[in-house]
Image (cartoon, rainbow, N blue to C red):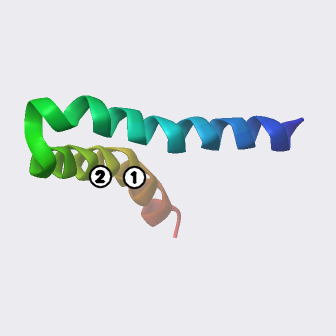
Amino acid sequence: MRVYSALIGLSLIWGMSFVFIKWLLDPVGAWGTVFLRCSAAVLILLPFLWIRRGAS
């Protein structure tokens, strides 16, 4: 069951990225979409980097 829940979670993350691109493309344009996606990735991944760096 854990494998299926991980698969469903990954499917939602992957699929929603296309929905967010569609929603953002008209209001902010292509470069704005790229900037917002990269900024979101930094905000999500930075805490993991801090935790990992503190553990070593």
The mark tally for this picture is: 2
Image-quadrant location for residue 29: top left
Task: In the rendered structure, find residue 42 and report the number of the disc placed on it.
Answer: 2
Residue at position x 19%, y 44% from top? 33
Three-letter amino acid code of the residue under disc 1:
Leu
Q: Secondary structure at mark 2?
A: helix
The residue to which callout 1 is attached is: 45
Q: CA distance from mark 2 to mark 1?
A: 5 Å
35, 2: nearer the viewer: 35
- Dots 2 and 1: beta carbons under 8 Å? yes
Q: Quadrant of the N terminus?
A: top right
Q: Is residue 42 above or below residue 21?
A: below
Q: Dot 1: within a 10 Å radius of its alpha carbon, few (fewer than 14), some, or many (20 or more) residues? A: few
Residue 55 x, y percent position in the rendering: 52, 62
Q: Residue furthest bottom?
A: 56
Q: Is residue 54 left or right of residue 23?
A: right
Q: Secondary structure at mark 1?
A: helix
